[in-house]
Amino acid sequence: MTTKTKTTCVRDKASAKAWRTMPVTDLFDKLPVGKRYDQRTVFPYGKVPVIDQGKSGVIGYHNEEPGIRASEEKPIVTFANHTCQVTLQKRNFSVIQNVFPLKAKEGVDPWFLYYRIRDAIKFQEYKGHWPDFVMLQFLVPPHNEQKRIAEVLSAFDEKIENNNRIIKALDETAQAIFKEWFVKFRFPGYEKVEFVDSELSKIPKGWEAKGVLDVVERISVGKKFENKTALPNGKVPILDQGQSGFIGYHNEEPGVMASTDKPVIVFTNHTCYYRLVTYPFSAIQNVLPYVGANGFPTFFVYYLTKDKIKMQEYKGHWPEFEQQEFVVPPPILAEEYTNFIKPMVQEIAEAENENKKLAAMRDLLLPRLMSGEIRV
């Protein structure tokens, strides 16, 4: 018999007998979903998130009553019928077609349910997987061990969520500095600068009003992917038009090369999300990449153009985006801003990379915990 420790260990055979083989349908109740939404009926911002079948789960928001109630104390698991993506929702939400909310039954820990059914069905093709899913059986430990397993795995996710908060704070800081320099005109040395009239407003001397096409260069996205050709795991992420911007992976060459030294901005044509990408990627239809042009660095152009167009209805917005005008400084000041915020962007990239490693470690540990190979 192996001695029990405070950390992971192998337990005795008598303890192992408490594990039971159970049909997956004995672990949850499938909930009604209420009103379903789609890309055309969601907004970039709102009270209630709408869960879709993509890798990260959120397609947008609405401001009506939520279809499903959830909370930190009583989270709800979702299963995506076509892509086999599983999420854990801790706030009220709604869903699109083919996303099924699952409530843990009495005696089943909801976090354990979430981790237990993750990757239970391996996505092979874009089809309905629910009939296969409900035929599964799992080895299930007693409730107290369910909780311990979930605590081990959720520690990785909590660290990932903390990194995401850091990423958000850094991005907001870079945006606040941009506003201070280029909207309020309180850039370094502004006290000595003369202000002159322009067609838009009084602006610092040497600054100009320019259109989008004066500061932006569209680049090719390469081969386009879609839900049906995205994999749950792979080498190259595929960006989509959802709120979180990520639908899955593929294992071919990336359509767009990007890095912290050569970032790329993407604009989602129908939903009006803006993202600064610092890693190689591919995309679906209507995800439009661009970079800075005519001496204006991409970092500067990202914060210049971000949120300039907001989604009002599901339609193509690039023609409207092209018509926008901005007050821009001489490129040398835009370069100074880029150098100032670049350490923040590098820290964001490092946090994103750490998240990938944490997720890989969690996913390596998960099947061993669920099989009883490692006991806690």
Image: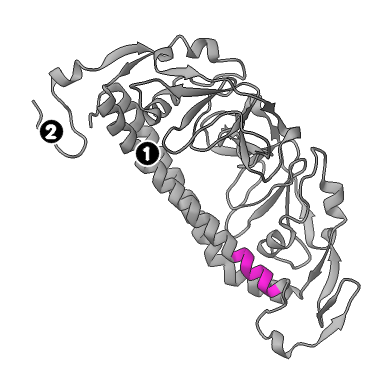
Query: Of label 2 and label 1, which has the lower sequence position?
Result: 2
Q: Which residue is depicted at the point 39% across and 13% down?
A: 26
**Is residue 299 among the parts visible in the rendering?**
yes
Tag 2: amino acid: Lys
Q: How far across and down, in percent of the image, does residue 63 sit? A: 68, 40
Which quadrant of the rendered structure holds the C terminus?
top left
Marking on residue 4:
2
In depth, the one of 90 and 359 nearer the eye is 90
**Is residue 245 among the parts visible in the rendering?**
no
Name the chief secondary structure element in magenta. Answer: helix
Q: Which residue is depicted at the point 70% across and 47% down?
A: 273
In depth, the one of 291 and 78 nearer the eye is 78
Tag 1: amino acid: Ser
In depth, the one of 223 and 13 nearer the eye is 13
SS category of the residue bearing label 1? helix
Task: Classify residue 17 as left or right of residue 96.
Answer: left
Q: Is residue 294 above or below residue 77?
A: below
Q: How far across and down, in percent of the image, does residue 295 sit? A: 75, 68
What is the spatial separation of the Cα atoms under label 2 and label 1, in whole angstroms? 22 Å
Marking on residue 84:
none
Q: Is residue 224 above or below residue 298?
A: above
Which quadrant of the rendered structure holds the N terminus?
top left
118 part of magenta stretch: no
Q: Residues within 10 Å of mark 2 (few under 14, many from 20)?
A: few
Q: Quadrant of residue 358?
A: top left
Residue lying at the far front of the rendered structure: 65
Residue under pointer 1: 154
Task: Classify residue 64 as left or right of residue 354.
Answer: right
Q: How far across and down, in percent of the image, does residue 141 sit? A: 27, 21
| Region in magenta | 174-181
**Callout 2 touching callout 1 (CB < 8 Å):** no
